[in-house]
Amino acid sequence: MTTSHSQATETFSKFGKSFQEKLVKILLFDRVFANQMEEVLDNKYLELKYLQAFTQLVFDYKEKYGTHPTLAIMAAVVRTEMEDYSSVIQRQVREYLVRIKTGEGAEEEEGYIREKALEFCKKQKLKEAILESVDLLQKSSYEEIAKVINNAMLLGSSNDFGHEYIEDFEERYTVQARDPVTTGWEEIDQILRGGLGKKELGVVIASTGSGKSMAMVHLGSRALVMGKTVVHYTLELADTTVAQRYDSCITQVPLGKLFLYKDEVKEKIVHVEGKLIVKEYPTKSASVKTLESHLEKLRQKGINPDMVIVDYADLLRPSSNGFRAQELRHSLEGIYESLRALAQKYDCPVWTCSQTNRSGINADVITMEAISEAFNKCFVADFICSIARTKEDKMDDAGRMFVAKNRNGIDGVVFPMEIDLSKVHMHVQPPDEGYQLRQVMVTTKKDQEEKLRHKYKKFLSNKGGKKSKDESEPEMTPEPKTLATMNRGEVRDALRDLKEELSSKEQQKHE
């Protein structure tokens, strides 16, 4: 640790006793932060004598044994290594250690304490360097002045060199709480292990008019009902419009009748335990940095988000990087990377949505290949699902959800959906009775292969000008009823036979 200096020493007194006790507790439990503070922390910065003594014991142990003490070790050190201190200080240190063992520190305060303590200590070291430079200036030792100032600026820099295999053994065996937030879809929560977790990015894909914005409202409203704080960013609709959709989703009053049942709606939503902030930005006017700035302001007011929703990421403005404009696909990839970084910084799940390209319009199942513009978005997200609705589905208030990517469980499965956008009702149903999840996927794939086979037959007919005798025979071209009973291997064999037949016909034509 550093030695005391001759000039009057400032202390943490302006921060108060509670701040100083929590700071010393952090020094005991956080080895990396303690290493960083050791370079700049003078014991005399601590106003209270027993905290000075406790901190000195921690750093003396580190210096002597080359490792950071645990709470159990510190209890032994306090019992055996304090004979040089007065009985009053010994008693105060023991009482402080008991408070550490039994107290429940507020984790949300730790970030503030770390930042302010480190900032205070670094400023004190810089002041010391400036005072030392006064004497050097009189001696014209300019190189020495630069060295002193530069060394002072480097003190207290991050000493986190990564996960140390031996030193951090216990850390990797500590259970990390994922603390997922429900999607409100029981079937999806099962394969997501409870919902989208902290620091994770989820993406909903849908074609225009299929309900991707409604899905965002559904996800937010389920979290809201569970007592969570939701921050919903809209770049396409008015904030009041989005809020009305929450009204409809929570109360199931149709959007067209909200004004008629205004009093009943209010009576129901006032009992919702969560907190919702809807922030509107014009299309392409806000970047991820803009959202981050808004979240910081909310945090300063004591509002910490449990879920962030961005409707939708493709409408965000790429962050300026000082270079010429990038291609759209590169810009979108950067936006999704920044959104995931936002989830990590604020330790909460982030949901957004993306629009499909033309291949997704009126498709039975939308896969990741149908994502508009930037396929690289898929690499960033932790969970991706799609909502597909054909014209017939829209008439029947139905649809299908395809789980395209899931880092926390199985993917590649299809679920039928019940969708009524008039009251923001979106319900994921279990697969049809008698089918397993994987079978739903296989059935869909089989249907696609059957369509491919019919297209191939049509191609053969057009290529040859007219059907040959062999082509019209049942054994060469099975009826659809027979094909439906084939497995995937049999379908592949049939396609191979047809290709061989085509090759043979082409060869005969040239001869």
Image: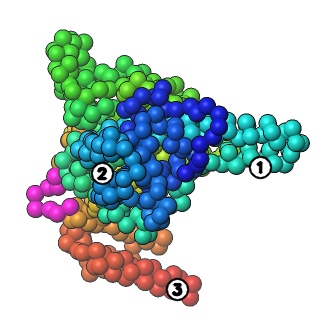
* Left or right: where 162 falls relative to 213: right
Look at the numbered disc 3 and give the secondary structure of its residue.
helix
2 vs 3, front mark: 2
What are the residue bounds of the magenta stretch? 430-437
* Left or right: where 169 falls relative to 484: right
User: Which residue is pictured at 47% across the width and 37% down the height?
Assistant: 46
Q: Pick whichever, 106 or 350, lies toward us.
A: 106
State the image quarter where residue 270 is shown.
top left
Q: Position of residue 238 (x, y in %)?
A: 42, 21
User: Which residue is pictured at 25% across the width and 12% down the height?
Assistant: 259
User: Which residue is pictured at 48% across the width and 46% down the height?
Assistant: 341
Query: What is the crowding at mark 3: few (fewer than 14 residues within 10 Å), some, or many (at least 20)?
Result: few
Image: 209 above or below 264: below
Mark 3 residue type: Gln
Query: In this figure, which residue is indicated by the disc labeled 1?
Result: 147
State the image quarter where residue 166 is shown.
bottom left
Q: Give the mark nearest the N terminus, 3 or 1.
A: 1
Query: In this figure, which residue is indicated by the disc labeled 2?
Result: 178
